[in-house]
């Protein structure tokens, strides 16, 4: 589990792999931004690769890529970069790492929407526009090939090889769907939604990737190897490269981790307060209760015959790691859909990774995929939807309805309470009832409270 040790472990940290402004958005039937291939990209891009091509890189993620010798060799062989240019990229990335150490910027609930912009500007200043674009394409190609993981060559069953096409696509097979902006993970079995979970996602500087992965092993009582990363530097009892034993209070992975293709995991260890928020360095985070429940259902979905007693025994000895291979590899879709139609309700989510997906064009695609049109909505509904797209964008534009607050009297005024950030707007669209993506079923929000099924 040492693939990208500088950043890519929470026992593994993820990556987003395209430079901002490196590609041109092209029309598509999905509200995840699909882009035209930049120079050097494959002419036969799969839906999953096309989504990956839209992800905007950050300097910490570039730092992690540059720590990989194979990636550096490709920069030299394919882009003809000099050692001086690679060293300059490393310095720019390390400067950003140092900034994170000083400001603790990653450990906030805010969205650093300027991170991809800073990365793009730095890379262009070092390489120029053409080489920066080629670096974007190469990074996508490097990621699309998939990093070798601990399960390579041992896969059981025939997992899907592509993302489902179209916006808000509903699986008809057994599959995990994580919609990043919705902070939601769904488990489908044979086309039926079994259960939904509210989850924590990667900080904007360490975002979850987009695309298709697979789950084929559940690891009980995992150990953890801290990466050489600014957030580890702030920990009292962790040193980069050392092994944190299973069951240790300093091990952030909790009782279970599920690799979904390095460098990403689904794992426990999160407090209820972190669910539905930025909570990890590139992984899908759950509470310990959630991950135990999810692991059981995942084994059932893969037809793995494991008894409750066996699982209890695995978890009882917290110092002993136990790996359980699933009988069927389960595809895991990591989606970035900020516009979702669910049974007559239009959900518009915050563009948490600043991917510029909350557009009228994408709204039309979502509606048209379900046989509707924006023009079919009432004038009030249309205005609500357009206002929501702006409000949930990474950088909302001022509107005429937004009036300035009156100046408070300095003697009597109290500091205004800080409002919790709004991450979603829901609009009733009754004409499309029964259409779209299914509403959450048995939603586990991490609080431990029992909830009634919607299924």
Image (cartoon, rainbow, N blue to C red):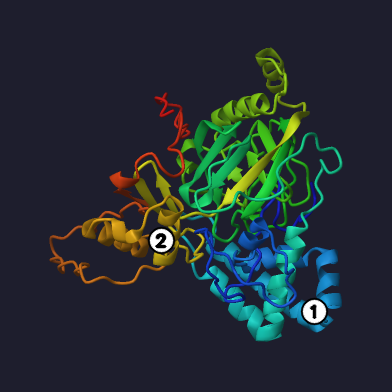
Residue on which the image places disc 2: 364
**Farthest residue, direction top:** 309
Image quadrant in which you'd find residue 435: top left
Q: How far across and down, in percent of the image, does residue 360 sit?
A: 39, 65
- In the foreground, 8 or 337: 337
Q: How far across and down, in percent of the image, does residue 272 sit?
A: 47, 36
Q: Residues within 10 Å of mark 1 (few under 14, many from 20)?
A: some
Q: Which is in the foreground here, disc 2 or disc 1?
A: 2
Residue at disc 2, secondary structure: helix
**Farthest residue, direction front:** 371
Identify the disc placed on residue 79.
1
Q: Residues within 10 Å of mark 2 (few under 14, many from 20)?
A: some
Whether residue 392 sits left or right of residue 402 in the image: it is right
- In the foreground, 157 or 413: 157
Q: CA distance from mark 2 to mark 1?
A: 38 Å
Q: How far across and down, in percent of the image, does residue 448 sit?
A: 46, 27
Image quadrant in which you'd find residue 151: top right
Query: Given contact means CB atoms under 8 Å apart, are the residues at marks 2 and 1 in contact?
Result: no
Image quadrant in which you'd find residue 248: top right
Q: How far across and down, in percent of the image, does residue 428 sit?
A: 29, 47
Q: Residue at 50% x, 54% y: name it.
A: 337
Residue 218 in view in this figure = yes
Q: Taking 308 as reference, is 117 above or below it?
A: below
């Amino acid at each position: 589990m040492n693939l990208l040790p500088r950043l890519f472990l929470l026992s593994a940290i993820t990556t987003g792999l395209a430079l901002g402004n490196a590609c041109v958005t092209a029309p598509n039937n999905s509200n995840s931004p699909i882009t035209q291939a930049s120079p050097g990209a494959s002419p036969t891009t799969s839906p999953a690769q096309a989504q990956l091509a839209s992800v905007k890189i950050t300097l910490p993620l570039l730092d992690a890529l540059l720590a990989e010798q194979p990636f550096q060799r490709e920069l030299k062989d394919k882009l003809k970069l000099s050692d001086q240019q690679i060293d300059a990229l490393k310095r720019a990335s390390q400067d950003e790492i140092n900034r994170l150490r000083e400001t603790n910027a990653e450990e906030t609930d805010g969205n650093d929407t300027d991170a991809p912009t800073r990365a793009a500007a730095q890379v262009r200043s070092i390489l120029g526009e053409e080489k920066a674009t080629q670096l974007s394409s190469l990074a996508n190609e490097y990621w699309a090939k998939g990093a070798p993981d601990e399960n390579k060559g041992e896969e059981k069953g025939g997992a899907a090889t592509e993302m489902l096409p179209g916006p808000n696509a509903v699986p008809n097979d057994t599959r995990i769907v994580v919609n990043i902006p919705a902070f939601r993970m769904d488990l489908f079995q044979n086309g039926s939604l079994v259960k939904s979970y509210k989850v924590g996602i990667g900080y904007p500087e360490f975002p979850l990737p987009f695309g298709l992965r697979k789950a084929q092993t559940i690891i009980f009582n995992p150990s953890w190897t801290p990466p050489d990363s600014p957030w580890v530097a702030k920990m009292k009892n962790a040193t980069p490269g050392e092994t944190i034993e299973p069951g240790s209070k300093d091990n952030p992975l909790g009782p279970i981790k599920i690799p979904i293709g390095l460098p990403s995991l689904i794992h426990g260890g999160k407090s209820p307060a972190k669910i539905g928020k930025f909570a990890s360095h590139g992984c899908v985070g759950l509470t310990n209760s959630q991950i135990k429940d999810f692991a059981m259902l995942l084994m059932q979905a893969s037809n793995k015959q494991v008894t409750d007693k066996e699982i209890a025994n695995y978890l009882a000895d917290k110092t002993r790691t136990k790996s359980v291979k699933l009988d069927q590899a389960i595809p895991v879709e990591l989606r970035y859909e900020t516009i979702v139609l669910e049974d007559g309700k239009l959900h518009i989510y915050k563009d948490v990774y600043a991917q510029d997906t909350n557009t009228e064009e994408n709204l039309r695609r979502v509606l048209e995929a379900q046989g509707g049109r924006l023009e079919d909505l009432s004038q009030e509904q249309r205005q609500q939807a357009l206002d929501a797209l702006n409000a949930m964008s990474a950088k909302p534009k001022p509107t005429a309805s937004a009036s300035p607050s009156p100046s408070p009297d300095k003697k009597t005024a109290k500091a205004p309470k800080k409002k919790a950030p709004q991450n979603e707007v829901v609009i009733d669209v009754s004409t499309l009832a029964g259409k779209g993506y299914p509403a959450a079923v048995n939603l586990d929000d991490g609080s431990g409270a029992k909830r009634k099924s919607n299924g």
